[in-house]
Image (tube, helix red, strand yellow):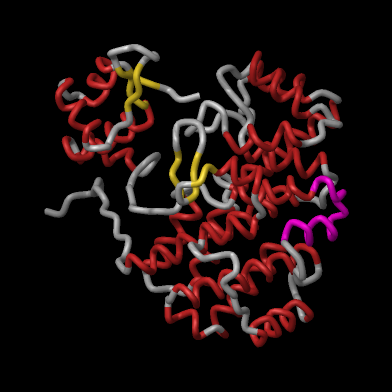
């Protein structure tokens, strides 16, 4: 559900007059809607107002505003990939939950990469042979460590990627996706990725669409930490493989995709005690954190809101999580991280498959951001406010 400010609230939030507020609306900077079918007054989208308030602070008092600007919402970069709205989000103008309900991951990947689905994406067979040779002589077995080794090999072998063209980056994106699928399943994909995963992970055919949906929903989410990292590295003139390698480390940090480990621990604790609700209740009473709830950008994370009702609830994780959110954590709602770990448990997927599936989907978005950054052809260079010892 969208959140709104009244005209007075919006003006106060922005620190401007009503006339200035109306000029922002007329310029398309802030969306407004009538307060009712026949109302003469308007209400203003809170997300637009809040974003403009953040920017306004930077211009009016940069020294103060920039102290916290990198915590949430800045620096602001131009991108045509993902728009985060009040309670949903869009890929290149398409509502993502609608795409998740109607399309395959491959079709949505084509939207993110701004290509037609039928455009041939040629994967160099020599590169595939190099990856296979590495896999057969593997010295590490953790899937992500192994994938990082593959990225290092491709970074060395694929000289064409250094042309930074759309075609070369798309080709690099395809070999990276296929290589990760090969690592996770033991075989190169010969069908759609969701279907291939379902066969390898022994997921019943009727549940294949939920794998497609999950990959679509997590493919991108604007300038999250990993996507921003990928863009910074790409802006330095590094290859798509190097950019993804850096983003991979960022993704598995404990404040990003690595947060799923905390959620897995929460569910494992619930399995031992027989009740997720009681485990959450105990944590609340002790003042301990409860991971997997309350996304900063939404009242209810639309990705979790889509996935959770479509999953089986044999372990009662979903129903008990909702009950805890309503009674113990209000106002709150489970996040997509929670939904991905629940999917792993409910579909009996291999250990850590929830986060691996999350990362596989996000890899498509990383390639889109890298491609867009190459097209912008300028370095990302932030500035610091010096707070150290001043020179004499």
How many labels, in total? 0
Residue depicted at x 78% and y 50%: 208
Residue stretch rendered in magenta on the structure: 193-207
Q: Nearer the viewer, residue 74 or 368?
A: 368
Say whether residue 354 is left or right of residue 359.
right
Percent of width and height locating residue 192: 73, 62
On whether residue 198 falls in the magenta region, the answer is yes
Which image quadrant is residue 66 in?
A: top left
On whether residue 270 falls in the magenta region, the answer is no
Residue depicted at x 18% and y 30%: 23
Outermost residue on the left side: it is 392
Percent of width and height locating residue 36: 39, 13
Outermost residue on the front side: it is 38
Percent of width and height locating residue 312: 82, 34
SS majority, magenta:
helix
Say whether residue 331 is left or right of residue 187.
left
């Amino acid at each position: 559900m969208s959140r709104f400010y009244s005209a007075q609230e919006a003006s106060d939030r922005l620190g401007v007059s009503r006339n200035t507020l109306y000029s922002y609306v007329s310029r398309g900077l802030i969306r407004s809607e009538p307060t009712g079918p026949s109302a003469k007054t308007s209400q203003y989208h809170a997300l637009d107002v809040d974003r403009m308030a953040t920017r306004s602070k930077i211009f009016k008092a940069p020294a103060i505003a920039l102290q916290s600007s990198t915590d949430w919402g800045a620096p602001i970069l131009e991108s045509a990939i993902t728009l985060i709205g009040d309670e949903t989000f869009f890929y290149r103008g398409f509502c993502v939950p609608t795409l998740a309900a109607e399309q395959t991951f491959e079709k949505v990947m084509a939207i993110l990469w701004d290509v037609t689905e039928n455009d041939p994406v040629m994967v160099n067979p020599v590169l595939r042979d190099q990856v296979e040779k590495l896999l057969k002589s593997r010295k590490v077995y953790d899937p992500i460590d192994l994938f990082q080794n593959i990225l290092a090999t491709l970074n060395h072998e694929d000289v064409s990627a250094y042309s930074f063209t759309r075609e070369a980056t798309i080709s690099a994106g395809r070999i990276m996706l296929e290589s990760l699928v090969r690592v996770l399943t033991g075989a190169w994909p010969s069908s759609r990725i969701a279907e291939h995963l379902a066969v390898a992970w022994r997921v019943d055919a009727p549940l294949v669409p939920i794998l497609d949906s999950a990959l679509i929903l997590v493919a991108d989410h604007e300038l999250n930490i990993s996507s921003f990292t990928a863009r910074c590295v790409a802006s330095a003139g590094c290859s798509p493989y190097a950019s993804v390698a850096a983003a991979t480390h960022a993704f598995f940090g404990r404040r990003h995709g690595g947060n799923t480990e905390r959620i897995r621990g929460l569910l494992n604790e619930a399995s031992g005690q027989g009740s997720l609700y009681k485990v959450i209740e105990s944590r609340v009473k002790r003042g301990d954190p409860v991971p997997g709830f309350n996304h900063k950008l939404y009242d209810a994370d639309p990705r979790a809101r889509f996935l959770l009702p479509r999953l089986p609830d044999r372990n009662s994780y979903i129903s008990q999580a909702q009950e805890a959110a309503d009674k113990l954590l209000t106002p709150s709602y489970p996040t997509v991280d929670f939904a991905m770990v629940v999917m792993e448990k409910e579909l009996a997927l291999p250990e850590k498959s929830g986060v691996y599936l999350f990362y596989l989907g996000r890899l498509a978005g990383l390639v889109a951001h890298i491609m867009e950054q190459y097209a912008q052809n300028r370095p990302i260079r932030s500035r610091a406010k010096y707070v150290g010892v001043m020179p004499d």
